[in-house]
Each structure stands twice: as C-alpha cells, then as structure tokens.
Image: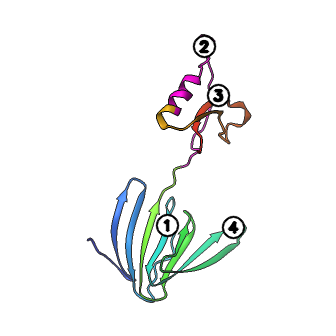
Amino acid sequence: MIIQGKVWGYTSPLFNKNNVEMHLMHIKKGGYCSKHFHKSKFNRFVVTHGKLKITIWKDYGNETILEDITIISSGEECTVNPGDFHRFEALEDTEALEIYWVSLLENDIVREDQGGVSKYETKTDFSNEVERISAQFGRKAILKYCSHPECGPICREKTASLSEM
C-alpha cells in the first residue's frame, strides 16, 4: 500500500480510474487540511472510525458567503460540490474514505441547427426498433419524443427508453 505523508496524518490511494478516485485517510486529532476547492471534482468524505468536521464555504454572490459546518462520525458521509471552498478537521483520531468523481454533464450538447429528414429520405418506422429493444432487454421499450431541455418544443427526435417494470 502506498502511503503519502501529510501534515495532518497520511493518505493511501486505493483506486483511480476514469472519473473516480478513492483514498483512505488517517487524520490525527486536531489535524486539518488547507481551505481549498476543486474546479470539477465532487469530494465525498465517509468516516469509518472517529469524527470529522467538514466546513464548506458557499458563495451566493453579492458578497454573501455562508459557512456550513457538518460533523460526521463512523458510517456517515458528507459531499462537497465542485467550486465550494472546504476544509476538514479531525475532532478525534479519524479514518475516512475520500472519494472524488467528476460528473459528466448529461446535457453537454450544443446544437447549431435542428436535425430532420431530407426530402429524399423516407421517415423511419421505429416500431421494429422498439420491438428489438424490448426483446433484447426483456422489458417493454417505450417510444417517446426528445425531452432535451435545451431543445424545447422544436425538437421532435424520437428515442426509445425501457419501461421501469
């Protein structure tokens, strides 16, 4: 196991793949990290032993900054959003998992124009596709129109989704 010394104790990286990273932290009583934020990472603390104080500074603009303090014990967790300044402090000798992840934006598409069917193409009959998806997953597929918030009522893109049976 790799051990990385810190002024507040030490951390051991456990997992780092794609958009998820996990560390095991051992924090001495009274140990605390710098006040910092992550540009794009969520940061979750899960205490396995001890007690951890998480301070989050939320900036609401117009010079309003709220200091939110959460104290978590064994089995409890606290998540810090990207862009929020935060600091942890061990109120007693503490062991915790620190989990980072990046959330991919579901609506990250920027449309310059609208898709359609050229005058030379025939409209697609989705009934066979819906039947194929239903058979493949053993659940009824439902044909629906696009619900992309950024498209609004102009987008009539058809999509198939599985029913929640």
Image quarter where the C terminus lies is top right
The residue type indicated by label 1 comes to: Asn
Res 60 label: 4
Report the Cα–Cα distance between label 2 and label 1.
49 Å
Q: Percent position (x, y) of residue 67?
A: 63, 77
Q: Of label 4 and label 1, which has the lower sequence position?
A: 1
Q: Which of 72 and 10 is in front in this view?
A: 72
Image quarter where the N terminus lies is bottom left
Splitting the image into 4 quarters, where does residue 63 fall? bottom right
Of badges 2 and 1, nearer the viewer stands 2
Q: Do the residues labelled 4 and 1 touch (CB within 8 Å)?
A: no
Report the Cα–Cα distance between label 4 and label 1.
20 Å
Residue segment shown in magenta: 105-134
Q: Of label 2 and label 4, which has the lower sequence position?
A: 4
Q: Which residue is under mark 3?
A: 114
Tell me the element at label 2.
Answer: loop
Report the Cα–Cα distance between label 2 and label 4.
52 Å
The residue type indicated by label 3 comes to: Gln
Q: Which residue is under mark 1?
A: 43
Give the residue at the far left of this rendering: 1
Q: Nearer the viewer, residue 129 or 136?
A: 136
Of badges 3 and 4, nearer the viewer stands 3
The residue type indicated by label 2 comes to: Thr
Q: Percent position (x, y) of residue 76?
A: 52, 75
Q: Percent position (x, y) of residue 110?
A: 60, 38
The local crowd at label 3, few if under 14, some if 14 to 19, many if 20 or more residues have their Cα within 10 Å, is few
Q: Which residue is under mark 2?
A: 122
